Image (spheres, coloured by chain):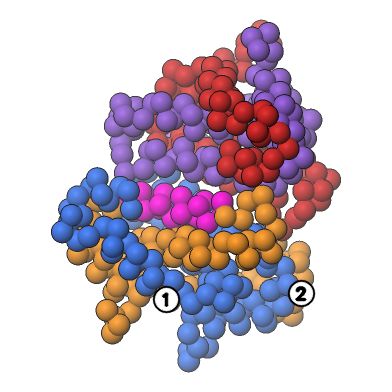
Chain colours: A orange, B blue, C purple, D red
Amino acid sequence: MNHMNTMDKINKFRDDRDWRQFHNEKDLAISISLEAAELLELFQWKSPEEVRETSIERIKEELADVLIYSHMLASNLDLDIDEIIEAKLEKNNIKYPVDKSRGNKEKYTKL
Amino acid sequence: MNHMNTMDKINKFRDDRDWRQFHNEKDLAISISLEAAELLELFQWKSPEEVRETSIERIKEELADVLIYSHMLASNLDLDIDEIIEAKLEKNNIKYPVDKSRGNKEKYTKL
Amino acid sequence: MNHMNTMDKINKFRDDRDWRQFHNEKDLAISISLEAAELLELFQWKSPEEVRETSIERIKEELADVLIYSHMLASNLDLDIDEIIEAKLEKNNIKYPVDKSRGNKEKYTKL
Amino acid sequence: MNHMNTMDKINKFRDDRDWRQFHNEKDLAISISLEAAELLELFQWKSPEEVRETSIERIKEELADVLIYSHMLASNLDLDIDEIIEAKLEKNNIKYPVDKSRGNKEKYTKL
């Protein structure tokens, strides 16, 4: 599948299985939330350092699941992943001007 | 920023602000979970159809936030987004063979 | 344990195992979020009616887990469960006056 | 409302507003998850100590919201809060015998 981009590969995966019929957007949004919880679980009761050492393979899989469902939701709604990210970065650029936000945790925590 | 790819743009955004120092991976995993909750909130008390009609602009922003924090976590851990997605799809390909999974909600719900 | 109240039973469970030492409040808040996700998972890809019929025993367990970790966090912070609920209800009573909120989904969705 | 127990007070709050008609269990489960995220947000980017000092009033409110929606879901499904907690503690008692679990983080993290 090497000539396909990531969105195409994800769509091929679910269309090969004819699963799009089950994928209403509300349940896809639930999926993203559940996969985010599974990812977070890997960090629970641990310092970030411990996690790096012990769970990197599991992190790859759970983070991939968050991303896969995010792509599926985007595809259902005809959204371009790169475009919505860029639009949000531009909005954040205005909200957090570099000169006022640089190294500033206050601003940062309100991102 | 048009010649940069999406990961480069996200990294430029936070490095311009010197925010990477605050971004331990545990709190980034919390961020992904919180943004996923904000996305899910848009679907609450509504049918998927109502959401499409009323909230598409908000969905773009919240889904972008999920994706932005997912990229930041990947960057912290030196993970390539496209690679981890492809590896997970390949694993799922084995777990859910097309001939047994096609149009099959049972298999599907266990994805 | 029948003469003890619910909070006492939960505290006895963890103190018998000397587990309070591991229970910093940040990770307990993560626990509540993860258990809420496990509860939500039971409702995914289903109508509320299907869930009632098929998953009531699992719901009991996952809802109990949400409540148990909520009690543990309250105990760590010396909060009285009934008091904080009553205080929040009183605040909501002011925010959503009965005469303006009755049967009103608009008000309701902003609760 | 002092002679009523907590469940009665919560039910009175929503029945006074005739809101039970909106409360399907799937969306209530989403509510619990969203309120758990709002609670978790208070702990983000902070140590547990910082949170105790700065956010105790907000914690009371968000934890109360988790508990209020948990009670509403229980009421919808005719579940007794104290009973389901006790049943889960008994199950955990068997799964984590005191003599093997005492002070043992391994066992603990698998709770």
For label 2, count other residues whose C-alpha is less than 10 Å away and answer few (under 14), some (14-19) or many (20+): some
Residue A91 appears in view: no
Q: Residue at x 64, y 70 (%)?
A: A95
Chain assignment, label 1: B
To which residue does mark 2 refer?
A103
Horizontal and vertical percent for residue B82? 42, 76
Task: Say which element carries label 1.
Answer: helix
Q: Nearer the viewer, residue B107 or D97?
A: D97
Horizontal and vertical percent for residue C38? 47, 41
Q: Residue at x 68, y 43 (%)?
A: D105
Horizontal and vertical percent for residue D97? 62, 28
Nearest to the eye among marks 2 and 1: give it: 1
Q: Quadrant of the N terminus of chain A?
A: bottom left
Q: Quadrant of the C terminus of chain A?
A: bottom right
Q: Nearer the viewer, residue B19 or A2?
A: A2
The three-letter code of the residue at mark 2 reads Gly
What type of secondary structure mainly makes up the magenta span? helix
Task: Tell me which corner region of the image, top left, top right, bottom left or bottom right, holds residue B69.
Answer: bottom right
Chain assignment, label 2: A
Q: Is residue C40 left or right of residue A45?
A: left
Q: Residue at x 46, y 34 (%)?
A: D28
Q: What residue range appears in magenta? A: A24-41
Q: CA distance from mark 2 to mark 1?
A: 30 Å
Magenta stretch encompasses residue A17: no
Horizontal and vertical percent for residue A101? 73, 74
Q: Nearer the viewer, residue B21 or A102?
A: B21
To which residue does mark 1 refer?
B82
Q: Name the mark on residue A56.
A: none
